[in-house]
Amino acid sequence: MSTDLVPPSVPRPLADSAIPEGCPAWTGEQTRRWLSALPPRWLLPRLRGVRDEVVTLTLCGTAVALGYAGLEPYLAALLPLQVLWVLLRPELVRVSAPALVAAVVVTERTGWPTLVAAVAVAVASLVLAEVRLRARRRQKAYAMEAAGGAVAPVPGAGVPLRRGRFLIGWGLVALAAGGALTALSSDGTAPTVGFLLAGLGLSIVVSGALGRVRARRLLAAPVPVLRVLVREGTQARTEVFAADDVHAERPLFAVSVGEVDLDEEESGEGKSGAGDSGEDDDEDDDEAALLEMLDDDAPGPLREAVLYGVPYDGAEVVLVSADEEPGEEPEEPVVERSDGPVRPLTVLPSEEALPEVAVPVQPVLRWRAGWLDALATLILVQWGVWIGWRSFTDPGNALWEQVLVGLIGVWGAARVPVKLAWRITADRSGLWINGLTKVTHIPWDQLLSARHQSLELKLRRRGGESWAVSAPGWKRLQRRRGLVHPYDRLAAQLTTLIADPSLRPTGESEERERGRVLWPWAAVLAVGWVAVLVLARVNL
């Protein structure tokens, strides 16, 4: 749920010269049919906020747990990877699922129960992957129908293609590292981690290669075109809307894009030359603007655009749009290529609405951690304790594994007090937030927004680091029961205070009301954690 104030959306116009002849607008029934072709929402990746981190950690933890349970290392890694591939790269599942069964068959130490389980996982992943792939074909058909036969050459087709190079390089590094770890270690969880790292590296290589192949096809010949609306969304992704969705109520999909330098096409090579200090200054400005954009997760202005290519889950596209910050003179359209695959969005308008909550009129307002934060802390602690116990009660584990688990426990000891005892105090000067080593003050004129997305509550400030805390939630249950998540209530109240200064507290909070630094509790927990692990190791 986004709880930013909704800015007025007046799409910035695109020059008529940038719109191909006969290019239709993607609107109305055509976009509804495209949305109806999407697979079930739980099958689509929703990589926002901390959700992707939670999924990744869960899959890695599952692989390590299966390795501890005595499963073959390659199986312990392959089973969680199947879930990842179903969500992100269903094309891989057509190969990985039969390979999983074949690997079990040729392994002498595996019995019938393992074979039956592998076949069940392979069949289930194949079915789910086919659901995703069939949905893609329907999306392609509906998008082609919406274009109505209108095609045009892609602008900037002569600019060298960089798509996929970075991913392929890093994927090969991860693949090699995983292979080396597997070959050099035969005990403990190292082989499982090696197979998992190799599988992740293979996924990255395939993602880069598929993106590069699809991007080449897109630039090779005239492609279907559609008129749409776009804006810069959160996490440096561009959101695409129907051409008639002038209030940006329902994004169709999001895609990471990079601007194309058309001058590079004309010259045939990148710009070079000594003494171009102006270019260096521009690069520094661009880097600073990029960092500011990554920190500022408020959506950008809505702009008219032309979409080149057929949009579907996993597609590559090119966008030609109006400039975000047009000057007094007419600006050239911005040409952008996708740097990542198209990802349909599953956020419904009802999820974007602010909850109806009142702001109490008091000299000083306070919010603090509640039962949901305690639940999140319990989940974190039991996961860490379980991993630590298994690591330190197994004499065969390597020293590096024990050191790693110890460091993870120290990190958890620093997180637990913050999750259990965070406090926000609002007075006339701004917000006071206690933390691990200090109490942070955010003046009202620096507080930009309060957002609750996925599992995370985030307060964003101007010229400083954002503050965030996370706790579980279940939006479907909340909608059915009419419940309001505590983070939604807090974000809505702070958004109201940001928008209306007359509702802000008028009193001055005392120092004792602002909460205390939490590092003493973290130090006690860290010392206790290390002491327990040392005693467990000594008693073996």
Image: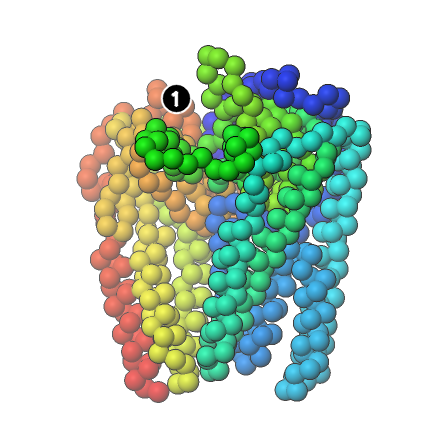
Residue shown at 30% from the left, 84% from the top: 538
Residue shown at 57% from the left, 65% from the top: 199
The quarter of the picture where the C terminus appears is bottom left
- Crowding near the residue tagged with mark 1, few <14, some 14–19, many ≥20 C-alpha atoms within 10 Å: few
The image quadrant that residue 281 belongs to is top left
Q: Check disc 1 and report its element: helix, strand or loop.
A: loop
Residue shown at 45% from the left, 35% from the top: 271
Which residue is the site of mark 1? 500
Task: Using the image as rendered, state which of residue 428 and residue 311 is in the foreground.
Answer: 311
Residue shown at 60% from the left, 74% from the top: 75
How far across and how far down the image is residue 146, in percent?
77, 30
Farthest-out residue, left: 511
Q: Is residue 92 above or below residue 143?
A: below
On screen, residue 55 versus residue 358, left or right, reads right
On screen, residue 67 versus residue 281, left or right, reads right
Please indicate, yes or no, whether residue 353 appears anywhere in the rendered image.
no
How far across and how far down the image is residue 84, in percent?
60, 59
On screen, residue 18 versus residue 146, left or right, reads left
